[in-house]
Amino acid sequence: MSDDLVWYVSYGSNMCADRLACYLQGGRPEGGMRTYTGARDRTPPAQSRPTTLPGRIFFAGLSRNWGGGMAFYDHATPGSTPARAYLITAGQFADVAAQESDRETVVDGRIERALRDHEALAVGDTQVIGDGLYARLVRVGTIDGRPSLTFTSAAGLDAVPHTAPTDAYLTMIARGLRETVGWDDRQIGEYFDSVRRRDPGD
């Protein structure tokens, strides 16, 4: 299963290819405070493409890497979120998720075992795996016949206090938005303003 290909759908700083590379090949992201060990398989993604997630992101918690709020995704809240899908192995997906949750990468860990059952997850279904920062696995769709998945916090947008992200973190997300959807500074600024509102109707 670890070699099976899946689409990892990123909605935060990992939309930037250089940022994702720190989770796959190892390294420290620009503006970050941590150096990552990388995945067991350091092969770059086979493909990447822009996509859209139904739902909204929000910022909460305290990042050990960026020093402020982290981006999480709530698939149950109305909205539309720009995202980037990477075609990687299931093992790489599990290793990225582990490092996002400040955990060591392990062979056949909880997320990797859960991915064996990804076909049992209908689009929109979720599964909470453990108690990590990004413990909720979400099946967000299918691309070219392969499952597309992401991970987020177990708690949704309205269940936790929101925390302001740092400028360094927003700069990395902005890089990813430019790479992925070609937005300019005005569009990015409007997007950041919108996701920092708790009520999507504000």
Image (spheres, rainbow, N blue to C red):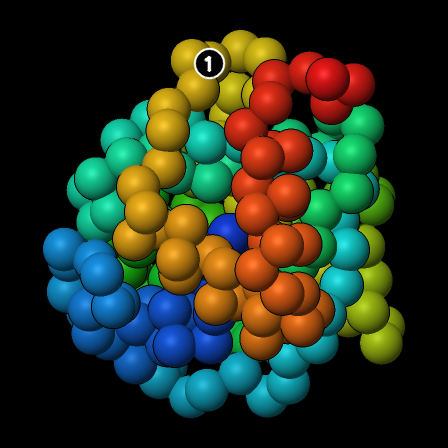
45 versus 123 height, above or below: below
The residue positioned 67% from the left and 54% from the top of the image is 187
Closer to the camera in the image, 122 or 168? 168
192 versus 118 height, above or below: above
Left or right placement of residue 34 versus residue 25 in this view: left
What is the three-letter code of the residue carrying label 1? Val
How packed is label 1: few (under 14 Cα within 10 Å), some, or many (20 or more)?
few
Q: Is residue 202 visible?
A: yes
Residue 64 falls in which quadrant of the image? top left
Q: Is residue 6 visible?
A: no
Left or right placement of residue 133 versus residue 37 in this view: right
Residue 39 falls in which quadrant of the image? bottom left
The residue positioned 79% from the left and 34% from the top of the image is 79
| Residue at the front extreme of this rendering | 186
The residue positioned 24% from the left and 75% from the top of the image is 26
Closer to the camera in the image, 187 or 2? 187
In which quadrant will I find the N terminus?
bottom right
Left or right placement of residue 7 versus residue 34 in this view: right
Q: Which percent across, then down, holds residue 12?
A: 51, 52
In which quadrant will I find the C terminus?
top right
Secondary structure type for disc 1: loop
The residue positioned 21% from the left and 58% from the top of the image is 32
Q: Which percent across, then down, holds residue 27?
A: 20, 74
Q: Residue tagged by mark 1?
A: 160
